[in-house]
Amino acid sequence: MTSMARKWDETYWEEILKPYHQFCLEKLFDYFVDVLIANAVALQEAGFDDAIDAVETLNALRGSLSELDRSVEDLYLAILHQLEERCDRRTAGVVRLGLSRNDVDMTVYRAYIRDRACELLGSLNDMRKLLLSLAREQTATYIVAYTHHQPAQPTTLGHYLAAVECLLARDFRRLWEAVKNVNRCPLGASALAGTPYGVDRNLLAELLGFDEPVEQTYDAIASGDWALELSCALGVLGSSLSRFVWDLIHWAEKGALKVPEDLTQGSSIMVQKNNPVVLEHCRALTAKLLGGVEAISVLNFNTPFGDVNDHTVHVLGPLEEQITYGQRALKLLNVVLSKSTFAKDTLAKEFENKNVLASELVDYLVLTGHCDLLEAQLKVKQLLDVLEQKGKALPQAHWEDFVQSLGVEDRKFLEALKLEEFAARRSVLGGLSFEAQSEHLRRAESRLFEDMRELNRLLGRVQVARERLRKSLDNEGF
């Protein structure tokens, strides 16, 4: 037998072992079997020919355990127990040569989190694709942009949505770099000093779909920064999504974003209300993305480097929850953006009583040679003061107001107050002009395509490795 039968304290079983067993049974079983098969293949390559005899039996175990024997601590030992019952003793023993729960667990955890994180990256790319599509549709939908919670300058909805995609594109790169660090294989590190059986650790990594081994064996089992780095990147994604959600809530509040009824809820007492609660749920989920960072940070902070005990399910649980919260938030936001509509008339009304083109008057005075910058700012400020005294804003100004305060006589000056002209003059890289927006969207779509292709390449490698491990041996073997 793999281990002596033990009777666990009931509280220890209920609070620690049972939840861990259940988590592993539901989510990690195939990963543990994959690790054992990969080790068997590597042992065969190292000269242990009978190790490969266990592969068929190991694959046959998939889905065969509905619950764990309470006499063993974890799923790994339970699988070995089953292997001993189905194989001869030598075969069951040789397949685990050089393995420790340390390198086995860390390999399983990294593989599982890699796969889950890749699912989230796929959802993030779906969101980026949708934002860029909407940005193309809305390149001429003018909105008032805010800074310091005050109306600032005109822009377009397309320009805004493209900016959000830029933020999420950087989130993708942060997460992608973290995933690449996750996707390094600890197997072969054994307890910490390395396996003595001469297996090829590069082969082990390849068989399990990893990019490469974790080079140093002690580092392979002791480090926890792979989880912390991914957690922090997920936290940053939560902040990015939350900022976007706040703006969507602001637009929904003003009626500028029409959220469909199947994503809203009415009031229990106020019959006139239809609340876009889906956005509130999105906001709550983004907050939970940040919450996991603290848990994993503290676990890393409080764990000696040479001790891996805290880097088990206590890290895996919060990290998986973060990924799940991120997935849910992205899926909900995707539905909101796909089904909601922007009310262009409502967005346009914001310009009626706001001085958002005041800075353009300053720039126009300078560009046409009327005066220098400081004098132009002073004159435009005087114009705004005069208009305020009359109870008006810049859109209600008459030609006489401009003549009196600014000293201009050419009526072409009024062109400065046209939104289309404001946009056209901003033709710099990434600017507001139609040409600049179109060029930026072309670049952004190209970047997204490359990110999607890079992710798909990893997914393809993992899938090929998984299918190779999870099939029955044919005549050619591995």
Image (spheres, helix red, strand yellow):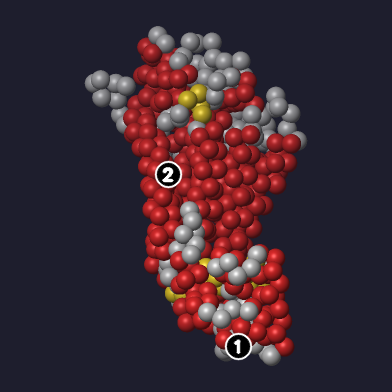
Residue that protrudes farthest toward the left in the picture: 475
Give x and y (percent) for residue 413.
53, 77
Indicate the quadrant where residue 216 lies: top right
Of residue 166 and residue 65, the one placed in the foreground of this image is: 166
* Three-letter amino acid code of the residue under disc 1: Glu
Indicate the quadrant where residue 16 lies: top right
Give x and y (percent) for residue 90.
44, 14
> Along the horizontal axis of the image, is 305 left or right of 25?
right
Of residue 317 and residue 181, the one placed in the foreground of this image is: 181
Q: Which residue is mark 2?
A: 451
**Residue at 53% in and 82% down:** 349
**Residue at 54% in and 34% down:** 182
Q: Relative to residue 154, is residue 460 depicted above or below?
A: above
Mark 1 residue element? helix
Q: Which label sits on residue 400? A: 1
Mark 2 residue element? helix
**Residue at 37% in and 33% down:** 461
The answer to whether residue 441 is visible is no
Give x and y (percent) for residue 324.
54, 52
> Along the horizontal axis of the image, is 152 left or right of 119?
right
Of residue 68 and residue 33, the one placed in the foreground of this image is: 33
Few, some or many C-alpha atoms within 10 Å of disc 2 (few <14, some 14-19, many ≥20)?
some
Which of discs 2 and 1 lies nearer the camera? The answer is: 1
Q: Quadrant of the C terminus?
A: top left
The answer to whether residue 150 is visible is yes
Of residue 90 and residue 211, the one placed in the foreground of this image is: 211
**Residue at 59% in and 35% down:** 226
Few, some or many C-alpha atoms within 10 Å of disc 1 (few <14, some 14-19, many ≥20)?
few
Q: CA distance from mark 2 to mark 1?
A: 55 Å
| N-terminal-most mark, 2 or 1 | 1
Q: Relative to residue 163, is residue 71 depicted above or below?
A: above
